[in-house]
Image: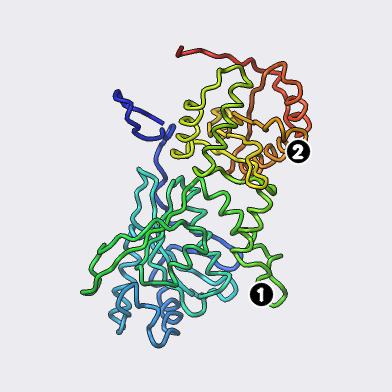
């Protein structure tokens, strides 16, 4: 956290932020569909035919008035082709080569790493298909590959199917912007959803597990829903009894943290321990996992996000690992280490680091048993900057 001269928190540093890449007109290739930069002569007739399968026009309710004439369709397609924000893509069925929908990136802010997905036109041939989910996966993946930090989904708050789709795809609901717009003389309250770059690795794993061919039977029916895949990943990511700490854990967790500091020779200082852990939970600038059994916290570990210049990738420091004295020799430490490694992999972290006292032989044996290797190449130096 960065503070000003008055010790007011200003925000967490974004180290070396270069900005994201402006979206390019590239083809995004999937197994069931591909996304091609929209060209009206190449895609227009096929897209119109697919969208006109919606004969009563109900699918246009929240986007725009439905085109009624050849001139209307031509004007819309001309806008789609010439626009760079929104940047439109045709969703092409790989099997038939037909255009079955369209989508776009919009409200593009490469400098701040924010981009939105929208203008979704899913024809009846695309709705509720594997290709529909795959198209959204391809859009997400490309946005994060371009370096965006925040991927947004917005919709009319009355558009229940769109809101369900956002949550199904792993977006986080952030709230309603009331009276955000006036559409066709009608008030629109806008629902906001987001997916962050730190959340993408876990969400990507879920989407890829669902899209895997093994998840579908010979009739093309899913074996597991996206929600089931998400729960399965969560179950395999964190062993039984382990979860992310919350503010509700603060009394017990602060006591464990104070005991941890005493283990390393600090004087007992409950207020300092309480405030330190409280700040970590509020600011979310570390990952704290706890081991709970029958309502009692038996241990915790804390992971601090860092970066490796040599790897040019994120690494995490496993800064704390502590098990209550009464709970030792019961596998709590081992379970926390395994959960820490799983969580780091989920976030795309390349390496976990830790330090421990040279005479802490019990911990060293545990680390070695879990596959940790002691560094034989580098010395660790410290420069004390405070009292």
Q: Residue at x 63, y 53 (%)?
A: 234
Give the number of marks.
2
Which corner quadrant of the image does residue 186 belong to? bottom left
Q: Quadrant of residue 375?
A: top right
Can you give x and y, in whole percent of width and height, for residue 188 in the image? 28, 68
> Foreground mark, 2 or 1?
2
Between 252 and 169, the one nearer to me in the picture: 252
Residue at the disc numbered 1:
221
Q: Residues within 10 Å of mark 2 (few under 14, many from 20)?
A: few
Badge 1 element = loop
| Residue placed most toward the observer, 266 or 201 | 266
Q: Which mark is residue 68?
A: none
Q: Is residue 44 left or right of residue 321?
A: left
Q: Position of residue 138 (x, y in %)?
A: 52, 59
Does 124 appear above or below 155? below
Q: Label 2, label 1: how many angstroms apart (C-alpha)?
A: 40 Å
Position of 377 with respect to 89 (left or right) is right
Which residue is the site of mark 2? 331
Which residue does the image show at 49% across and 80% down from the upper left?
A: 124
Quadrant of the image occupied by residue 15: top left
């Amino acid at each position: 956290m960065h503070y000003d001269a008055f010790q007011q928190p200003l925000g967490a540093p974004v180290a070396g932020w270069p900005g994201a890449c402006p979206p390019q007109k590239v083809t995004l290739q999937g197994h069931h569909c591909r996304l091609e930069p929209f060209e009206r002569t190449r895609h227009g007739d096929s897209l119109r035919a697919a969208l006109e399968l919606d004969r009563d026009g109900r699918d246009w309710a929240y986007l725009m008035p439905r085109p009624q004439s050849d001139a209307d369709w031509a004007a819309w397609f001309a806008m789609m082709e010439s626009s760079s924000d929104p940047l439109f893509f045709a969703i092409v069925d790989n099997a038939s080569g037909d255009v079955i929908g369209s989508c776009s990136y919009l409200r593009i802010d490469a400098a701040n790493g924010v981009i939105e997905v929208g203008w979704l036109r899913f024809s009846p041939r695309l709705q509720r298909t594997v290709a529909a989910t795959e198209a959204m996966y391809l859009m997400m993946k490309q946005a994060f590959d371009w370096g965006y930090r925040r991927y947004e989904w917005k919709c009319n708050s009355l558009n229940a199917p769109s809101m369900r789709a956002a949550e199904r795809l792993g977006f986080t609901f952030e709230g309603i912007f009331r009276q955000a717009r006036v559409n066709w003389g009608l008030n629109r309250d806008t629902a906001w959803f987001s997916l962050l770059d730190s959340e993408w690795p876990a969400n990507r794993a879920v989407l890829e597990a669902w899209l895997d061919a093994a998840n579908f039977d010979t009739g093309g029916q899913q074996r597991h829903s996206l929600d089931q895949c998400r729960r399965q990943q969560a179950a395999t990511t964190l062993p039984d009894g382990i979860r992310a700490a919350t503010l509700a854990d603060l009394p017990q967790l602060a006591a464990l943290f104070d005991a941890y500091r005493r283990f390393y020779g600090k004087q007992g200082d409950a207020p300092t321990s309480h405030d330190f852990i409280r700040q970590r939970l509020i600011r979310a600038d570390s990952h704290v996992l706890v081991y709970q059994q029958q309502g009692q916290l038996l241990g915790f570990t804390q992971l601090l996000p860092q970066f490796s210049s040599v790897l040019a990738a994120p690494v995490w420091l496993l800064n704390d690992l502590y098990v209550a004295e009464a709970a030792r020799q019961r596998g709590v430490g081992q379970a926390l280490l395994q959960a820490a490694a799983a969580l780091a992999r989920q976030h795309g972290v390349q390496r976990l680091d830790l330090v421990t006292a040279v005479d802490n032989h019990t911990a060293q044996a545990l680390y070695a048993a879990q596959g940790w290797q002691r560094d034989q190449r580098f010395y660790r130096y410290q420069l004390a900057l405070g009292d």
